[in-house]
Amino acid sequence: MKKRLLLAFGVIAVVLVGALLALPELINVNAVKDRVVSALSAATGRHITIARMRLTVFPWLGVRIDGAAIANAPGFGTQPLATVDDAVVEVKLLPLLDKRLVIRRVVLTRLTLNLETRGPGVDNWQMGSTRPAPHPAPAPAEAKESPLFHLLQAAGVSVRDATVRYTDLRSHTHYGLAQLSLRTGTIEPAKPVQIAARGRLQTATLNVPFRLTARARMQGSHYSVSPLQFALGDLILNGDVEATRGPGGWVAHGSLRVPRFAPRPLFTLLHLAYRPASPKAWQSASAHLGFSYTSSGVLLTPLIVHVDNSTMTGHLSLDARSHLYRVQLDIDTIAPARYLPQTPPSPGPARPAVAPARLAPPSALTTLDVRGLLRVGRLDWHHVVLTHVTIPLVLHHGLAVLDPVDADLYGGTFAGRVAANEAAASPTVAVSGRLAQVQVGPLLTATGLSDSFSGVLQGQARLHAHGHTAMAIERSLSGNMNMAISHGSLRGLDLDFIASDPRVAAGSHRLKKVTGTAFQHLRASAVIVHGVAHTRDLYIKTSRAVVHGQGTIDLPGKSLDYLLQVSLPTGFTVPVNVKGPFGHVRFGIAVGRLLGERSTKKAVRHFGHALQNILGIH
């Protein structure tokens, strides 16, 4: 009896398995395909095509689709919004009998998405709004009919070798993901799902690998991603995001954190031609920021960025309609010259151009529109140190205007205006400003001009230059300036001693050590042409002498050449040459001029020997 029962059950099992295996042949899959295509097209307002649809029953009940495509929205490109070479959806059979949907797996192979936007709310992935419905909308009672199935669980989604392209048709910018692989954990309504993805990030100039892991939750129109981690080379971005889709579009907020990393290898990975001038630049960086997003723009606050030994805090916003950035930053200390592009090697002797040279493509600075305020505690610009700096900033299409700039400078203040044009073939800069109560000694030492002066400086200048490097700027520097120094000194030449002791003229006294000249006033103006400052009205007033002078200062050559006329109380005038490279300036009697002014060589020779003894010249 038992054997007969087992045999009966075996026969029934064989019949059931055979029936299931024969099910795909018994069902008219093409008819089902046509109904599926019609229903999806009506729901999305897009033309949908499916090349082939197959039903599978072993080991799971499922549908396999080959060659599916969703047409693009009207007014966008001719390429489809989405295509997939192969899609597999498998479900558990028994829950279907109770209108419950339990998805075993979803596998999409070679999925391609072509996303396009013309502005906020005008994009090609909005479904059901780009094409009018072919039939009147159903009545409210019909719209609230219960769905055919209730999703209970999906074991996971797998996307293999996908491509995602994003195009902003207004700015003609393109971004994309290639070789994208994505896997999710179990998907259940209102419960978080694990997501892992990897692929290559592509732009017009980039093709770099990335990794992403996240834990996402969806409840109605509300989405949350926490935690989120995105890795690009050594750069790791951790974040938490909350987003809601409403009538006005997406609204999102969250925070992002970048642990400390070394940016230089990332520059290499991104194929950036930029190389900073200093090896100390971009050794380390980190960031922490909060953000909020609406269709009207983006706000980053608080914004905290660490680059090397600099810390920047503040906020930044972007208006989506005008593309205007507004920024306010407080920086504790920074040396901007470190981050300027490295000077390229000399190309050697110039060759005649066969055709006009093509200008390089504009940099990002030429496309930005920025308004803001920068406050810097300590600004080191080519070794000139300013403190408590306030800089209102306007940047529009490559033209940057800083006005008014206020700063403390070596015991005094600087107030002025700076304008720079990055859009020009050779970047230009113009500076106008006023110095008040500045200690001239530290200022001249910092600029490398001279360490021979001290005193309190008042002055003003209007200067302009062009070039990519400090040397190019020095060689092109032109403009005018005037200055007055009070209560100062000139090292290396004691003019007062010459005027104070009549025995000097007789040569009966010798100065053992030349100390310098203290003066009450020094005034001068200069016209600067291609890095050379020309002065014709130098005036120095000491306690015993009056000095007039003229000459030049060669900034690129780091040297000066001046002739001083030292008027003594006796009425006699001594011409003195001051010349040489910065740091090794020498003083000497202008003997040729003395000969032109005196008829007796003997008297001149006697006086010259006396002054040489005083000045220590042999």
Image: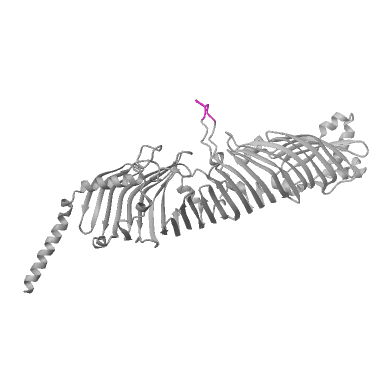
> In front here: 3 or 351?
3
Main SS class of the magenta portion in the image: loop
Residue 204 falls in which quadrant of the image? Answer: top left
For the point 67% across and 41% down, which residue is it? 418
Tell me the magenta residue range. 350-357
For the point 14% across and 57% down, which residue is it? 19
Residue 225, image x, y percentages: 44, 58
Q: Quadrant of the N terminus?
A: bottom left
For the point 21% across and 48% down, which residue is it? 29
> In front here: 514 or 46?
46
Look at the picture and state if 289 lies above or below 350: below
Q: In which quarter of the image is the C terminus?
A: top right
Left or right, residue 251 beside residue 543: left
Left or right, residue 273 beside residue 113: right
Q: Can residue 590 be seen in this view?
A: yes
> In front here: 88 or 526?
88
